[in-house]
Image (cartoon, helix red, strand yellow):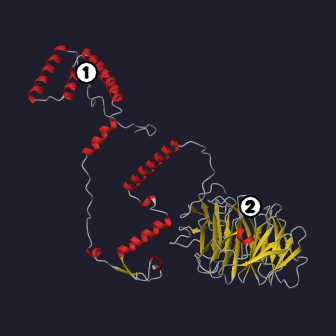
Amino acid sequence: MEDKNVIKLPVTEDKRKAKKRSRSPPKNDPKGEKQLREVNLKRLAVLGEEDGSVKRLEALVFGAEEELLERLVEEDEEEQSSVLQLEDEEGGGDEDSAGKDELRPQLQPRKAAWVDEDDELEEEVDMKHRYRRNLMKGDAESVLSKQRLQQRMKEQFQKSMGGTPSWAQSSDQKKKKALDEEEEEEEEEDDLLRRTGNFVASSESLPCGVLRMKKCLHANSARPSADRLTSVQFHPSAQVVMTAGLDQSVSLFQVDGKTNPKIQSVHLERFPVHQARFSRDGRTVIATSLRNKMFYLYDMMEGRVAPVRSVRGLGLSEARVKDFSVCPDGGALLLTGTNGYLHMLTLKTNEIVRSMKINGDVSGVAFCPDGSKAFVTSEEGEVFVWDVRSGRCLSRFMDDGCVKGTAIAASPDGRYLACGSQAGVVNVYSQEACLNSTNPKPLRAVMNLLTSATSLTFNPTSEILAVASRVEDEAVRLVHLPSLTVFSNFPVASRKVAHRVSCLDFSPHSGFFSLANNKGHAPLFRLLHYKDF
């Protein structure tokens, strides 16, 4: 009987028998090696093998130690001589490579694998369709062939983009463009070396034709408005933008062009904002509504919102406080009243200190850079020049060809005055001529808008005039000064970016441009010509 406590191990075969005997190392037999070498040499001679690499291999395997050492020394000397030869011939490498390039066979252009016979037939396209009307150059072009339409669309795209983009260029075109740029740089360097004098100059002025700009994330993307935006303005000293609209809120955003984070948003109960502006020192936001005599003062430093329910000195005839302008001295507002009245309100005591009246209703106010004079346009098309300190009318003139005035703006450098009309015409005058003449002539009539010009704004450097209409989509143009020509690449023709614009503004150093539209967004653009915010 077997014992259950005993653990049996599996029986293993004797593996020692299965192991093969390792071969013992061959004995050193000089005579045998010599005979084997002679046999190999005879075989190579019979086969006619004259390859040098085989001979080197044969000599390395069967040769003696002295021959191996001699061969290694020779190879080391050959490597050193080849390095010296490369250094000597380094200058002539370009000519050799050029010669090799000439000997290379020219690549044949590829042929199409399949050709559709219908492509050869000229298909005519109706140009009167609403999507293709803007491509017509005349009434006679009611029908165009498919090839001509493609060429026309290509030309329009290149015009809007300021040339052919890099991704649409072939490799040959890119090489040619790079060579041309190198030649131009060399010519400029040669011209620079030929001249002497002071090369320290001011920054270049803004060129006309195409405005270099980049579309950024909406300024209010962190908190878009649920209703139409009515105001957008950049802070006078900080990198901040303010938006306000009919959703009863005023919002502040930090401008970086990438995320534009929200700083703060203030909700004003039952107060759809008609207009909002920063004070001159940037500490306060003034907001007015549509049908309300009350307005709000928002102190950003203290985070306090103070309603101004009544204004001392404002007559009972004024039912609301709606439109206003911030005086350049920063201590007062010029309120637009009814029946042609303008009221000067001081922010220290919130009372009216002076009133002025024009013939007809006020449609716009603009100040001179020093704030001593104000240009006021009426709905009758007449422009008045007022002394702000004394409240006296200095002069007045009729806007050329204007039936009903809608907007007015003065450039920060004191050179230009722009007057907009209901017909969409914007007349640009010289401020000096408007101050010294009763019948000034416009420098240029900008006629790119087809509807009422409701918004006019100059950039801080007085090189761009932005004009817009809130009546029609994409009715916004940027005018170059002093050439008084419109930039051709804004707005983009292929898609809507602006919609119906109600307000425009530039950052303090013209680095950014933004607008408020009816979609509740504030599109933001980076103007690449300007380096600062």
User: Please, what secondary structure does the residue beneath circle 2 have?
Assistant: loop
Question: Disc 2 marks which residue?
Answer: 236
Q: Using the rendered view, name the quadrant where residue 42 is placed.
A: top left
User: 235 or 50: nearer the eye?
Assistant: 235
Q: Is residue 454 visible?
A: no
Query: In the rendered view of the protein, which quadrant contains the C terminus?
Result: bottom right
Specify whether 493 is left or right of 1. right
- Is 20 or 400 nearer to us in this picture? 400
Question: Which of 493 and 180 lies nearest the eye of the viewer?
Answer: 180
The amino acid type found where label 2 is placed reads Pro
Number of numbered labels in the structure image: 2
Using the rendered view, name the quadrant where residue 229 is placed.
bottom right
Residue 478 is labelled as: none
Q: In this view, does 54 lie to the left or right of 320?
A: left
Horizontal and vertical percent for residue 408? 70, 74
Residue at x-position 45% and y-position 58%: 166
The image shows residue 404 at horizontal and vertical percentages of 69, 83
> Which residue is disc 1 drawn over?
24
